[in-house]
């Protein structure tokens, strides 16, 4: 029965690969050498916006003009579709040569033999160019299977005008959870029972319950080194703390505000409906576009208490070579350029992304000016307290087992410790 299911799945993947190859705007990886003898590198990304597509194509153009042995061809595929097609093309034996992929799932692709081992293309000192916490994520069993391209970090954005209105010092953002609560209550603006402005809500923005659990627990990840750390006293306290915010402002307020969270133009922080907001560093680009006159500051996510560090979490993307690529050596040369100082500095300055190359990030910060420099330097400094959460190969579905239990607690059907204990037990049972 299992063999039949596996055969059916493989047939479906192969069928999808043929279908998707016909639907994309590329012609597959069929022509791997040009008429004049240049090796062709098929490069797939999801960067198709009016902002980012010209940037990545400039980097490609610069690389193509920098040498005469390789030509890179860019294919844009929509978010989500790109990874479905990647897996299908690998199964069909006709993958891209380089693809931009998620940084937190490199180990899964390495374990499943969906990506090439890059150790033969890069020397031992190659990794010294990149932030260590990023490089650690691209290694599997001591070998690199991707090269970090960019990352991010969560920061607390706060409205300085709202601070002044509430009698708070706009140059002194909250540093602890206790201060965050005190500030938020002063920043709340109500008309009777209706909130016109909410000081803060911990699940709004680019942050979730899992992040606060790790923040509270001295940076202890939910799963680390094959062990599960979900049901700990600090993490129990964290989910109880999150629910206390919901209880204070009321579920009706939470729901009504969230119903208005639609577009960048109506972002509740930019529109002034929320005074403090956690988001990734390049949220700044939205503020520049839609809140040009906004007086705001940025600070680390508040720490659990005065003795704790302001732990944040991050994600990001990597450049990798899919298993079975036609031109892996040429692909590796392009990856070196893509993640090198020149290309990375350009990307950083244009996007305010936290690039993976340390020297490029530092140079970008030096060359930026004014508010641009202030915000970008703050995000670089915050990387010291930022952790990635790579999907553990032993527990690939742990979040799917944890999140429903946290939701049950938030809805009042389970106690906090009961919810996390149940989640811990469920995760431990499925260890691979």
Image (tube, rainbow, N blue to C red):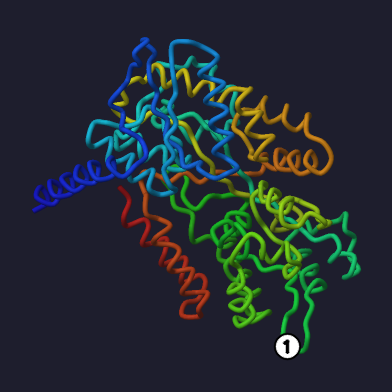
Foreground pick, 123 / 216: 123
* Residue density around tag 1, few if under 14, some if 14–19, many if 20 or more, within 10 Å: few
Q: Dividing the picture into quarters, in which one does residue 114 lie?
A: top left
Q: Is mark 1 on a helix, strand or loop?
A: loop
**Residue 380 location, x and y as percent?**
70, 38
Extreme residue in the front direction: 35
**Residue 243 location, x and y as percent?**
60, 73
Relative height, residue 197 to residue 38 (above, below): below
Q: Dividing the picture into quarters, in which one does residue 198 lie?
A: bottom right
- Total marks in image: 1
Extreme residue in the bottom direction: 192
**Residue 297 location, x and y as percent?**
80, 53
**Left or right: residue 28 compared with residue 126:** left
Foreground pick, 152 / 430: 152
Q: Which residue is drawn at 44% across and 62% down?
A: 402
Relative height, residue 432 to residue 31 (above, below): below
Q: Residue at x 59, y 66 (%)?
A: 262
The residue that mark 1 highlights is 193
Q: Dividing the picture into quarters, in which one does residue 271 lie?
A: bottom right
**Residue 41 location, x and y as percent?**
40, 23
Q: Residue at x 75, y 38 (%)?
A: 377
């Amino acid at each position: 029965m299992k063999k039949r299911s596996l055969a059916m799945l493989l047939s479906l993947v192969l069928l999808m690969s043929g279908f998707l190859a016909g639907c994309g705007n590329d012609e597959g990886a069929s022509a791997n050498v040009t008429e004049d003898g240049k090796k062709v590198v098929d490069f797939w990304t999801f960067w198709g916006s009016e902002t980012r597509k010209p940037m990545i194509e400039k980097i490609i153009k610069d690389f193509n003009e920098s040498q005469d042995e390789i030509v890179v061809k860019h294919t844009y595929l929509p978010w989500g579709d790109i990874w479905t097609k990647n897996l299908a093309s690998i199964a069909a034996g006709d993958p891209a040569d380089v693809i931009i992929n998620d940084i937190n799932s490199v180990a899964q692709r390495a374990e499943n033999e969906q990506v090439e081992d890059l150790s033969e293309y890069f020397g031992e000192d190659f990794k010294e160019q990149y932030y260590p916490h990023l490089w650690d994520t691209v290694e599997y069993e001591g070998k690199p299977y991707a090269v970090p391209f960019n990352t991010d970090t969560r920061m607390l954005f706060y409205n300085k005008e709202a601070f002044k209105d509430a009698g708070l010092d706009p140059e002194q953002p909250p540093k602890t959870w206790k201060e965050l609560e005190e500030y938020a209550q002063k920043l709340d603006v109500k008309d009777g029972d209706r909130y016109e402005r909410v000081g803060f809500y911990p699940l709004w923005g680019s942050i979730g319950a899992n992040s606060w659990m790790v923040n509270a627990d001295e940076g202890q990840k939910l799963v680390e080194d094959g062990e599960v750390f979900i049901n700990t006293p600090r993490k129990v306290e964290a989910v109880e703390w999150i629910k206390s915010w919901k209880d204070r402002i009321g579920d009706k307020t939470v729901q009504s505000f969230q119903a208005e969270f639609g577009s960048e133009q109506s972002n509740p922080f930019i529109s002034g409906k929320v005074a403090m907001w956690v988001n990734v560093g390049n949220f700044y680009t939205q503020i520049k576009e839609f809140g040009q006159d906004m007086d705001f500051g940025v600070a680390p996510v508040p720490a659990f208490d005065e003795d704790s560090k302001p732990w944040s979490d991050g994600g990001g993307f990597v450049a990798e070579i899919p298993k079975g690529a036609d031109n892996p050596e040429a692909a590796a040369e392009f990856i070196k350029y893509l993640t090198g100082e020149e290309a990375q500095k350009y990307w950083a300055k244009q996007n305010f992304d936290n690039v993976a190359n340390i020297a490029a990030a530092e140079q970008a910060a030096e060359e930026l000016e004014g508010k641009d420099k202030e915000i970008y330097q703050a995000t670089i400094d915050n990387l010291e307290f930022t952790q990635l959460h790579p999907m553990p190969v032993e527990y690939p579905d742990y979040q799917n087992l944890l999140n429903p239990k946290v939701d049950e607690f938030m809805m009042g059907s389970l106690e906090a410790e009961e919810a996390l204990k149940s989640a811990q037990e469920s995760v431990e049972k499925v260890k691979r």
